[in-house]
Amino acid sequence: MPRQAGSCLSCQTLGAMFSVVITPEAKAVIAEQFAREGFVKPGLMIHRRGPRGEVTRSSTGQAEWNVERPHPWRAQVGDFQTFGENAEDVSVVEGILVWLALVPKPGELGVEVSVRNGELFVEARIA
């Protein structure tokens, strides 16, 4: 069984002082996405995104790089039916199964999932 939130209704402390906060607006967007997708076992994955690069060659043979540096965090919904009932890395936050696909960095207290421009937005909470 995934870990349940304790006395804090808006967050779940995971591991060494790492917490996940889901705003009411984000919870509504997540619920809407779950309903639209019709997942068997819906869940929210939170992970980091690194830079993406693409190299092409110019007509003279020189390397031309195009590097995109998106916001470093991402939250996306998915079906967690392949996760076992005792999945250690899945927790329940605000009634939502949450998988943190990351290793916290020093100084990170947790993340907050909110909504910006109609989409889920994840921001790190730093000490």
Image (spheres, grey):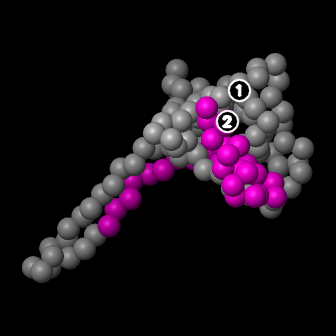
**Residue 44 in sight in this render:** no
Question: Of the residues shown, which amino acid type is indicated by label 2?
Answer: Lys
Query: Measuring 54% from the left and 26% from the top, which residue is drawn there?
Result: 125
Report how far apart the C-alphas of labels 2 and 1 lie in the structure: 12 Å
Instruction: Please report the residue visible at 75 percent of the width from the left and 34 percent of the height from the top.
Output: 93
Which amino acid, by three-letter code, is at mark 1? Cys
Q: Split into 4 quadrants, where in the image is the N terminus?
A: top right
In the rendering, at what x and y percent does residue 121 appear? 52, 39
Q: What is the tally of numbered marks visible in this picture? A: 2
Secondary element under disc 2, as helix, strand or loop, is helix
Residue reaching furthest to the left = 60
Mark 1 neighbour class, 10 Å CA radius: few under 14, some 14 to 19, many 20 or more:
many
As helix, strand or loop, the secondary structure at mark 1 comes to: strand
* Mark 2 or mark 1, whichever is nearer to me: 2
Image coordinates of residue 62 in percent, x first then y, are 15, 73
Range shown magenta: 25-54
Q: Residue at x 75, y 32 (%)?
A: 94
Mark 2 vs 1: CB contact within 8 A:
no
Question: Does the stretch in magenta take in 52?
Answer: yes
Q: Look at the picture and state if 43 lies above or below 66.
A: above
| Picture quadrant where residue 61 is located | bottom left
> Going from the N terminus, do you reach mark 2 or mark 1 first?
1
The residue tagged 2 is: 27
> Residue 18: where, in percent of width, then height?
65, 29
Q: Position of residue 101 (x, y in %)?
A: 64, 48
The residue indicated by pointer 1 is: 11
Residue at image coords 67%, 36%: 27
Location of residue 63 (image quadrant):
bottom left
104 left or right, relative to 15: left
